[in-house]
Image (tube, grey):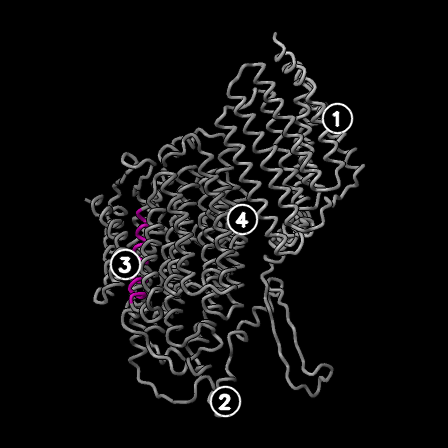
């Protein structure tokens, strides 16, 4: 039954592009692609939910009819990620059904509707593949389709450079992934064989597989320092596509890493865990620090993806460390926390990007310095965005809290370990996680305060109007999901517990996880009562200008800006930013009577400067040196051939 | 052994010397037309070799190949090249980057190198060692001409000499290739010369000269 449903889901997804082709001839069918896509995603949710909660596996194998081994199978891990993809995409598509016609017309709109389902389809193939071929097929298509979706917004020189960086890094990552698969040869045909052969592998080979998978999937996930593409590619995509890329596509990399590290290899020595922990710490801290300094909303959100991937990697690393030190219960908790954070991040990050889309729709910009006062003009968008902000910084009663708290819990449990280094390092990582959370809170206080509160900083922001109903509905659904998981985490935790028990044999969720889901609804209820009673109390109201401390005569140019708000933090962490500041005074040499003064501050991420720059410079220098061989003179080229011929003749004589 | 066979064997044994002479003379030549004439002579020597070899081994299709080579390489191509030289109306010297005497020394060195290179195969080939050395020398000299001569037309001549070397190598090691393949190769060469001749005219018309050493801005 589920198998038939799953097949029909795949067929329906694949037929959307065909339908788009029809609808571009026939104007009445304009809404059909979106409707069919949402319908098929709903079927996908049903399939994934049955498979996740029921736990029965099913397989679609076309290896017999096709000339290559292509098979999809859904076990609990796949079902979880399938659920993540379908349930997050559904509201995003609902949002797009109104966003895309408003912003794109003609060929570009048809193009979007044709490529979007294929992009979703490729991600579905990645998480459900059970053969090497199927996985890599989906993996490569995912990169290509997402690049295609980015290109829809135009191909100026700068954008092309960003897409080039994206494709380049994805290629490098894919090479590492392919390498990780090929090390399983000759058992690399399907996943079951690989799982069976992994136990008899020599340790060095296992380490090589792990490292390749770590680098390959880490590139896709965007861990620092492999994150370079992420803040370039995500902000330039159309907002719903950014939501899908940041919310959903990154998670396929987590899926791949979990599949390799836990399912195939079944854990390893504890230094694997420490490596993943380190990657998580660095990504989380640098991600949030770079985010704070941004004032382009979409780029800021992209950096927050780096941060959240860091938090997920912290959980995965802790799980590996616990598993290596024979405490499967805590490993299960950490892994559950990481997987739950995947789902949570998918939900609130898509919501944030959709919010950014709604803002750009209403105010024509996502530059925080030109926004302000949007809450009054877009109340529903503002509320949904506020819920997403609360979730991402991990406030209680929102979903981010549950997963971050579980991660904390597992780190603190590390102090009870008998292994000395683990007992030191894990609690320290909890400190890093706390710092990340605090910085994220500061960052989103800035975002929400500057964009939605205060007074409008531009004419466009002042004349912003609430977005149409489907866009509100898409954001509303995601916001509802944030609150639902935040208040009733048991909805997901129980099935995740079963999933981790499959991955880590002999583990079941500790008391810490289950007790949380019992307490949170009561806290929510009491909070609700408290808020209601405060609202019920009548209070005298006094009207003054916004953000003017009761004074009069202040204008919007005098309010806090995004840059000003983040200045203290940038000062504290100035080592991370290394800004290039230039002040130009015109005319030169008259500091007291200038005609104009311009100030510019360019922040290059120090990673680019110290890690990638030398490598790129070395390659360019080597290429320039090699270029001297290319004189352009045909006779020199002939001379090369001639010299090689003579050298070979002489060489053959002496061999 | 009849008279014809004896004569053929003598001719084969000594023809290597003629080939080396043409090689040295082409290296020394200062005018394009001289080079073309020398190429014609060289091809004639090879034709004689084919006739002798096929006479010795009683191969009837060898005579067909010889006729083909005679028509194409001894008559048609040199005639076409002469016409090109006349109609190009550019200075007729080969404008070499090495002087005439240097070229001769280099060609002599290349001949020595080719003897040096084919020595390991002497046992396998028996008396044909000089012939194989000649074919390698032709290939090397052809390459050398292409490198050192600046006129576009001399590149064509260099390529033709090089091709003669390959042809001769095939002849000495396997008594030539099957007729069909030989016909293919010869027509390939004819088309090649035709195209390159066309290109020489185009180069002259575009750049007002036919000097390849001045064409270096085509790189990326």
Q: Residue furthest front?
A: B3
Q: Residue furthest right?
A: B101
Mark 2 and mark 1 residues within 8 Å of each other at the beta carbon:
no
Taking A139 as reference, is B153 left or right? Answer: right
Mark 1 and mark 4 residues within 8 Å of each other at the beta carbon:
no
- Circle nearer the viewer, 2 or 1: 1
Label 4 and label 3 in one chain: yes
Tell me the quarter of the image containing the N terminus of chain A: top left
SS of the residue under disc 3: helix
| Residue A108, position as x, y percentages in the image | 36, 64
Q: Can residue A631 be seen in this view?
A: no
Task: Please tell me whether residue A76 is drawn above or below residue A144 in the rendered image.
Answer: above
Q: Which picture quadrant has residue B24?
A: top right
Label 4 to label 2, Cα distance in Å? Answer: 51 Å
| Residue B128, position as x, y percentages in the image | 65, 17
Label 1 and label 4 in one chain: no
Q: How crowded is mark 3: few (under 14 residues within 10 Å), some or many (20 or more)?
A: some
Q: Residue A21 carries which label?
A: 3
Chain at tag 4:
A
User: Going from the N terminus, do you reach mark 4 or mark 2 first?
Assistant: 4
Along the line of sight, the residue nearer the viewer: A297 or A145: A145
The residue that disc 2 covers is A554
Chain at tag 3:
A
Task: Please tell me whether residue A322 is drawn above or below residue A380 in the rendered image.
Answer: above
SS of the residue under disc 4: helix
User: Going from the N terminus, do you reach mark 3 or mark 2 first?
Assistant: 3
């Amino acid at each position: 039954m589920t198998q038939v449903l799953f097949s029909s889901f795949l067929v329906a997804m694949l037929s959307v592009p065909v339908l788009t082709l029809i609808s571009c001839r026939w104007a009445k069918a304009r809404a059909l692609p979106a409707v069919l896509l949402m319908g098929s995603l709903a079927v996908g949710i049903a399939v994934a939910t049955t498979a996740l909660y029921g736990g029965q596996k099913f397989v679609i194998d076309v290896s017999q009819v096709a000339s290559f081994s292509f098979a999809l199978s859904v076990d609990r891990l796949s079902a979880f990620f399938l659920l993540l993809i379908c349930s997050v995409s559904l509201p995003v598509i609902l949002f797009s059904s109104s966003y895309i016609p408003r912003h794109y017309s003609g060929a570009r709109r048809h193009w979007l509707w044709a490529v979007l389902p294929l992009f979703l389809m490729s991600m579905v193939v990645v998480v459900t593949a059970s053969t090497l071929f199927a996985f890599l097929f989906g993996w490569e298509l995912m990169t290509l389709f997402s690049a295609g979706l980015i290109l829809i917004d135009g191909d100026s020189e700068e954008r092309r450079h960003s897409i080039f960086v994206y494709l380049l890094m994805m290629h490098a990552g894919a090479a590492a992934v392919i390498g990780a698969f090929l090390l399983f040869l000759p058992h690399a045909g399907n996943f079951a064989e690989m799982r069976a052969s992994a136990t008899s592998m020599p340790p060095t080979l296992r380490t090589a597989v792990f490292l390749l998978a770590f680098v390959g999937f880490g590139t896709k996930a965007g861990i620092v320092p492999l994150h370079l593409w992420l803040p370039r590619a995500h902000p330039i995509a159309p907002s719903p596509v950014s939501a899908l890329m940041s919310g959903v596509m990154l998670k396929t990399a987590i899926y791949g890493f979990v599949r390799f590290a836990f399912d195939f290899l079944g854990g390893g020595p504890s230094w694997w865990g420490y490596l993943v922990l380190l990657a998580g710490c660095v990504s989380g801290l640098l991600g949030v620090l770079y985010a704070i300094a941004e004032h382009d909303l979409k780029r800021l959100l992209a950096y927050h993806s780096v941060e959240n991937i860091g938090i997920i990697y912290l959980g995965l690393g802790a799980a590996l460390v616990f598993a290596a030190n024979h405490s499967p219960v805590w490993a299960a908790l950490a892994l559950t926390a990481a997987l739950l954070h995947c789902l949570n991040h998918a939900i609130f990050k898509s919501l944030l990007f959709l919010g950014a889309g709604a803002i750009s729709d209403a105010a024509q910009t996502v530059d925080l310095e030109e926004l302000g006062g949007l809450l009054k003009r877009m109340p529903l968008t503002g509320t949904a965005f506020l819920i997403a902000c609360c979730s991402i910084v991990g406030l209680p009663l929102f979903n981010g809290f549950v997963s971050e708290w579980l991660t904390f819990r597992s780190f603190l449990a590390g102090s009870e370990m008998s292994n000395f280094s683990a007992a030191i390092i894990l609690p320290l990582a909890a400190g890093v996680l706390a710092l990340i959370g605090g910085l994220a809170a500061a960052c989103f206080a800035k975002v929400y305060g500057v964009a939605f509160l205060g007074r409008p900083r531009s004419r466009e922001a002042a004349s912003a109007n609430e977005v149409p109903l489907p866009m509100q509905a898409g954001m509303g659904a995601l916001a509802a999901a944030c609150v639902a998981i935040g208040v009733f985490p048991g909805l997901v935790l129980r099935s995740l517990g079963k999933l981790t028990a499959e991955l880590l044999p002999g583990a079941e969720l500790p008391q810490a996880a289950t007790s949380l889901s019992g307490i949170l609804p009561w806290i929510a209820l009491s909070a609700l009562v408290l808020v209601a009673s405060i609202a019920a109390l009548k209070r005298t109201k006094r009207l003054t200008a916004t953000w003017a401390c009761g004074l009069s005569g202040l204008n919007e140019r005098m309010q806090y800006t995004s840059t000003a708000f983040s200045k203290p933090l940038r000062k504290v962490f100035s080592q991370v930013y290394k800004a290039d500041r230039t002040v130009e005074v015109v005319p030169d040499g008259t500091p007291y009577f200038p005609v104009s003064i311009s100030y510019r501050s360019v922040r290059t991420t120090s990673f680019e400067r110290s890690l990638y720059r030398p490598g790129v410079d070395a390659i360019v220098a080597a290429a320039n040196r090699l270029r001297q061989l290319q004189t352009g003179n045909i006779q020199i080229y002939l001379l090369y051939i001639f010299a090689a011929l003579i050298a070979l003749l002489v060489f053959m004589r002496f061999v | 052994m009849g008279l014809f066979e004896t004569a053929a064997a003598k001719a084969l044994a000594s023809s290597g010397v003629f080939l080396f002479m043409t090689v040295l003379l082409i290296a020394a030549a200062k005018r394009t037309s001289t080079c073309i004439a020398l190429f014609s002579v060289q091809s004639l020597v090879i034709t004689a070799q084919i006739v002798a070899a096929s006479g010795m081994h009683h191969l009837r299709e060898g005579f067909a190949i010889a006729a083909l080579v005679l028509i194409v390489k001894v008559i048609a191509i040199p005639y076409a090249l002469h016409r090109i030289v006349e109609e190009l109306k550019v200075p007729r010297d080969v404008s070499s980057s090495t002087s005439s005497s240097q070229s001769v020394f280099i060609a002599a060195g290349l001949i020595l190198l080719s003897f040096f290179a084919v020595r390991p195969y002497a046992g396998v080939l028996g008396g044909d060692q000089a012939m194989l050395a000649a074919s390698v020398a032709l290939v090397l000299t052809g390459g050398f001409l292409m490198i050192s001569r600046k006129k576009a037309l001399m590149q064509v001549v260099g390529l033709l000499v090089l091709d003669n070397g390959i042809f001769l190598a095939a002849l000495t090691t396997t008594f030539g290739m099957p007729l069909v393949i030989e016909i293919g190769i010869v027509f390939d060469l004819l088309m090649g010369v035709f195209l390159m001749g066309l290109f020489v005219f185009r180069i002259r018309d575009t750049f007002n000269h036919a000097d390849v050493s001045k064409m270096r801005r085509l790189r990326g």
